[in-house]
Amino acid sequence: MSLPKYLGFLFAFLLVAAAGVQASDSPDPAYLDELLRQAVELRLSDAREWHLLLHYRENLWKGFTSEADGPAFFLASNGKTDPAAELEATLRKLFTDELVGRTAQDTQCAFPARYHWLKSVLAIDDRRLLPKPCVRFADWLSALNPEGVTLIFPSAFMNNPSSMFGHLLLRIDQKGQTEQTRILAYTINYAAEITTSNGFTYAYMGMTGGFKGYFSTMPYYLKVQEYRDFESRDIWEYRLNFTQDQVLQMLRHAWELGNTYFDYFYFKENCAYHILSLLEVADPRLHLTDEFIVWTIPTDTIRRIPGEPGLVADRVFRPSLTSQIEGRNATLSHDERGWLGHIVKDPSVAQADGFRRLALDRQAFVLDVAAHYLRYLGLSDERHAASYRERYRAVLVARSALRVQPAAVVIPPLSEAPEKGHLARRAGVGFGWRQDGFFEEINLRPAYHDLLDPEIGYTP
């Protein structure tokens, strides 16, 4: 073949190839009609998976209403109350280049969980509806590096009414994660955006849905620092038996929840309720939120999770700062406790001859306990925090001079695992004799724990 003929053939081939690419880039309107017809025939708008992704709840009389309250979450004008209209609108948006949602992305990228589910049940042909790259979502997923998921339950914090029932969040466990590196993983957390500092207004808005609740992602070590150190709350970790596909679908949905908010109700639609809804998206066979109709108490939900056959792989206890102090202090001898008290008051005592006559590993252990205690005092006593921090640094300097590895100490929990505790609500009847008179009583406690209850599973 001569050179001119060869170049002409090559040019014609490139034109045909370019035309083919152009055709594949343009969605086929006829294919949209096919998908819409299939969706109706399969009644996909009635599917549990679709209702979970849109957070639909059946109304008292008839119909459905989504618990999501951000209007940008819905692609149909009546999508909040019409699952069929929202499904049709989603399919139609997939065939446009319109940017949608609060995050202003292509439909595939703004709502990847919806797209993934529709693609699987409708067997969407990539040649007739081209997949989009979704760089922002891919970068976020890459940073998470997900392999598994762990449910995190920080125990009750009595100094804050909003935390006295505990809390629920998720940790996204990374590939290649070890016991030492798991604290570097990321979490998915749901919390209210607080807009007032007035106590009465805070309580009223929290109970009536006056705050907006948002999902967020942040490093686990920040949450550990907040709960374990600042608030001295024990943390219980429940690693869940989810497959890789289930974890990915849950994360796709977590991403698309960035397009909405939920009206936050302290007693019902709170952290525990919405974390459970994420677990249901991962595995639609779970019916976790159905049991919490009137109120959702984190201590009740954490009892529900281990009760689901095969859901929990293992459980890990992460002691609070105070639990660490008490656990280590219990192993000290009488003389070592005396040295501990002196060093906490005056770190220079660590250089005293009597203390230096202790074995190196015991010196190190006493200094470790002193450092933990001074750190706790610096966090809990704002008035004298500067003095405690100064002493804390002095103890760390003395400890580093010993060049001895910290002793491995297993800190037992102060109580049994939270799922072993009693139910939060209680009703009772009674009668007796008091002040020369007969009495009878009926009592009802809707929630929590009191002095007459066994402490198993609750903070002593």
Image: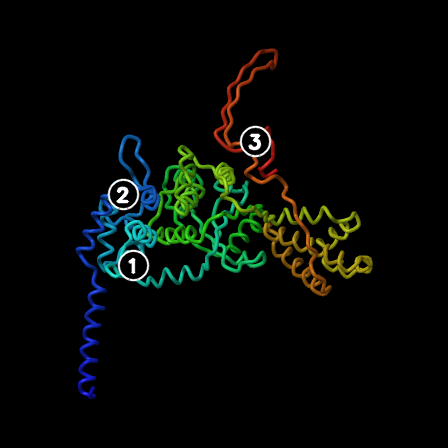
Q: Which residue is mark 3?
A: 450
- Between the residue at mark 3 and the residue at mark 1, the CA separation in whole angstroms equals 50 Å
Q: Which residue is mark 1?
A: 105
What residue is shown at x 64% (from left), y 56% (from top)?
Answer: 387
Mark 2 vs mark 1, foreground winner is: 2
Q: Which amino acid type is shown beneath numbered disc 2?
A: Ser
User: Is residue 337 left or right of 135 when viewed as pictured?
Assistant: right
- The number of numbered badges drawn on the structure is 3
Q: Which residue is mark 2?
A: 45
SS at mark 1?
strand
Q: Residue furthest front?
A: 1
Mark 3 vs mark 1, foreground winner is: 1
At label 1, counting other C-alpha atoms closer than 10 Å, the crowd grade (few under 14, some 14-19, many 20 or more) is some
- Counting from the top left corner in percent of width and height, residue 425 is at 50, 29
Q: Which mark is residue 67?
A: none
At label 2, counting other C-alpha atoms closer than 10 Å, the crowd grade (few under 14, some 14-19, many 20 or more) is some
Q: Are marks 2 and 1 in contact (CB under 8 Å)?
A: no
